[in-house]
Amino acid sequence: MDAVVSPAFAVKLSELGGLGVLNLDGLQTRYEDPSSIFSEIAESPKEKVTALLQKAYTAPVKQDLIGRRVEEIKDTGARCAVSVIPANTKRHAPVAAEAGTDVLVVQSTVTTARHHSRSARGLIFSELVKEVSIPVIVGNTVSYDVALEIMEEGVSGILVGVGPGAACTSREVLGIGVPQVTATIDCAAARDEYFRASGRYIPIITDGGIRTGGDVCKAVAAGADAVMLGTPFAQSKEAPGLGHNWGMATPDASLPRGTRIAVGVKASLKQILFGPSSLTDGTMNLMGALRVSIGMVGAQNLREMHDADLVLAPSIKTEGKLFQHADTGS
């Protein structure tokens, strides 16, 4: 996500043990110095910002910038991951791989192993995996059958989720989506079945809708091996979005499926991940929350937390919390 990951942000997140994914179809590869564009987007009135985003993304992606951005990250010793949409994968992936990227993410709103393409030979994940010789993560999907098919293509990870992100409007615009816990459970079941059949363990990454430490913990309990964090990271001092966030489909020229949202600047990236926190809403010290939750359910690690019991309890966050709501006026 452009509002979250710049080369500098990716380096900082790598230092903290995470993996920042740089959008190769985004502003960082369209402009030598995109800082003025970020400022314009942050300052634009709400009623004009979508048109501004659409205009900003009409600038062509520069192939030389792809390599240079990867090198900016790698030259610091940090791990580098990049994302591309399926339509641009054959063009951008070899450039990024040659520059030394460590992980390639092929991402669209909904992904399948079977593509219809106008080219003579469409994108075939099994061929891509062999060509780039680095781990390839593919997404997004939400179902058992599709997740299993994608795993059989030889990928190294799957992104799970359609529409739950704070800046995404796919559920309103397209009418599609699956509740995130359900999607994670179904795709994790495909992972486990594929592991039993092949001996290869393909991590599931819950992507979207993660706002608090509690959300991280529930995703892992549902079967996630990792989570993608967007808006929580957009609230960090290091994020390039200047207190704003927007999705990858927001600037679509004909059918925008996202919106710019004001998320504010909350704290440093390190404090959001590891604390200390003076907030009680679960939006800071996300890793601390995960460690405590793992212990509370009797697990020793993420794999064991997959076996935690899940219950459907719509009122669990409000039960007995009368005075908390009275204090906040909600």
Image: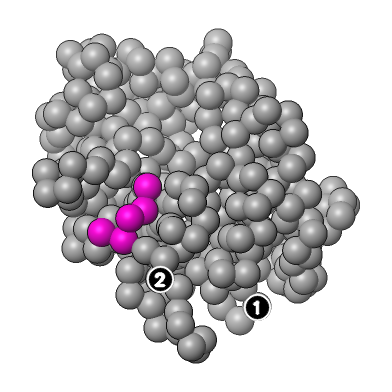
Residue 5 falls in image quadrant:
top right
Kindly state the secondary structure of the residue where label 2 is placed: loop
Count the numbered circles shown. Answer: 2
The amino acid on which the numbered mark 2 sits, given as a three-letter code, is Ile
Residue 266 falls in image quadrant:
top right
Query: Which residue is at the front of the view, 201 or 207?
Result: 201
How far, Cα to Cα, is label 1 from label 2? Answer: 26 Å
The magenta stretch is 152-156
Q: Residue at x 78, y 56 (%)?
A: 65
**Precedes in sequence: disc 1 or disc 2:** 2
User: Where's residue 278, x and y in %?
Assistant: 55, 13
Q: Residue at x 31, y 49 (%)?
A: 180
Which residue position holds label 1? 253
Magenta part mainly helix, strand or loop?
loop
Kindly state the secondary structure of the residue where label 1 is placed: loop
User: Where's residue 49, x and y in %?
Assistant: 73, 63
The amino acid on which the numbered mark 1 sits, given as a three-letter code, is Ala
